[in-house]
Image (cartoon, coloured by chain):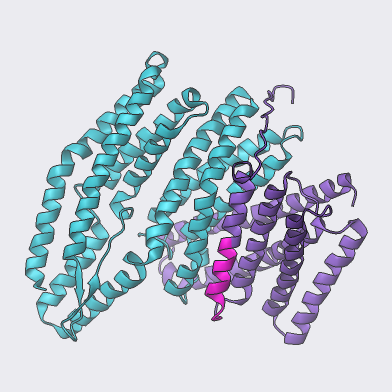
Chain colours: A cyan, B purple
Amino acid sequence: MNPAVTLAEIEQLTTRLAAIGTPLQALLPAIAVVLLALAVVPDMRRYLGPAVAASAAVLLAGEVVLAWFHWRLYDLAVVVSPDTGLVVGRVAVPLWIESEKLYVWALTVAVLAVCIRRQREQLLPGVTVVLALLMLGAAFWGKPFTEPLPNFLGQYTGYLAAMASGNVGQMMGAYQGMEGARQFYYNTAYMWVHPPALFFAYGTFAISFVATLLMVRHRHSSFETTAYRWIRLGYIPFTAGMLLGFPWAVIAWQGESWWWSGKVNLSLMMWLLYTAVLHGRLYLRRPGMWRWVAALSILSFVVLVLTYLATYVVPGAHSYL
Amino acid sequence: MSDAHAKQWDYLLMVLTVALLGSLGVQSFLGTLYVWWASSSVPGFEIAGYGRFVWWMNAIAAPQVVALVLVMGLCVPKRLFDRTALIGVSAGMVAVGLAAWALSASFQTGLAVYLALAALIQVGVVALTVAGVRGPSYLTEGRLVKTGSGLLHLGFIVFAIVVVALQRSTFMLPVFWAATALTLAGTLLAFYADRLAWRRRVRVEVERSYDEE
């Protein structure tokens, strides 16, 4: 590996990604505004279905571009041991981290929105608002095409610079950091299962949230059934994702009190709340119980949003601060 | 246990569980807010203050977690025993746990033994449910749904054993995978029994307005 050549190739790759992705990234807010208009104006709601399908197609096209970027990056991002000069492995950066999180969440909601069958007409306006907000977030906050993977590229280019410096101490320090991140973060099976499972669950919970709001508004059990169906669809990958985090956390965060990290805490709270919703609805025949179930369901989604934001504002083991 | 009593007991345990989970949730939320505030307002918090914060959080959470584990254990025999026997079995489980604590001088061991007893009873509950024996009482209907519910609760008990007793053991991973498989298979069965059933029953959804309530 020649660090200077690799660095130049990575710069070339990110430039190409920006060239392809900039129009797409600019298109996202425009689509979001159209979606919001269609969701808000009752006469235009008949166009919501095709508009949501078109949005899903655009987001999917963008995801293909991002997958290509990751594939090329996998070719370039090799880790070489300074001791032996041999390649110890490549970094397989998952498709749903850092700048790409909101984009993947938006894509998930868009695809799920296309799949809605039961009470589709009533659900679509609310789900579209959620989708539009996520697309705006992906365009203005995430910026996956113009500012891709800032943490990974920052660390990897730092590693390349250290390898080019010839300073043994620097080289060893950068190598250990990069190899540790490769083995225990980027390339772990956990990172390829835990985030997508949770994003899928977040998507279904968003739809369930909309159905719960409709239940409160119309005071009718059919919306509760819809909300429940979406929660149960997400609850399985959600539970799987949370459980799979446990052995990883025990090893990767050994010696840290990770269970009191803000993100882990709020995630556990969210799981407990959705579990409480599922248990609470077993008693729906009790008078007034639907209010408790609705309140718990809304609170669960509020905690979901807080959980997402906690990663960026509360320090701790599972934090990007 | 009579059906009405069983449902009342179920409800009481559910309220207790939700109350404990709620208080743990409130503690977690307040703790998170505190860390958020302290990390920007208290100089050197992450070096000096975070350790103290963790100590306090552990100290406040410990009795709640123990109570939660106890309630979780009590949820298990309720499926099998009538009210009088239930009190005896529950008291017996707690007594065995306390004895294990006293003998081993380890609170963790006491909890693990208590959970192991709960797991054993839950295995019995699942076996009886699968066999279709009238006995285990559930809030849900249908053998597959009940089996799913039994399996997923067994999974959680086994997971609790992993957290309480096996974190540094070589058995941690295999037992963890067993707990995960039980939980996920159980949840799948409990949620989608009507689609997985060999003989499908068409369920009629009873719709109603909440306006009368």
User: Is residue A312 toward the left or the right of residue B11 in the image?
Assistant: left
Vertical placement of residue A168 versus B163, above or below: below
Q: Is residue A30 visible?
A: yes
Give the residue at x 32% y 37%. A135
User: Is residue A148 toward the left or the right of residue A262 in the image?
Assistant: left
Q: Quadrant of the C terminus of chain A?
A: bottom left
Q: Is residue A32 visible?
A: no
Residue A261, magenta (yes or no): no
**In the image, residue B138 lies at what x, y percent?**
77, 49
Per the picture, the main secondary structure of the magenta-coloured stretch is helix
Residue nearest the viewer, comparing A109 with B188? B188
**In the image, residue B203 lies at what x, y percent?**
67, 33
**In the image, residue B31 lies at what x, y percent?**
54, 59
Give the residue at x 58% y 47%. A274
Residue nearest the viewer, comparing A212 with A229? A229
Magenta segment range? B169-181
Give the residue at x 38% y 42%. A108
Residue nearest the viewer, comparing B78 with A141? B78
Q: Quadrant of the N terminus of chain A?
A: bottom left
Quadrant in the rendering for residue A70: bottom left
Vertical placement of residue B120 versus A62, above or below: below
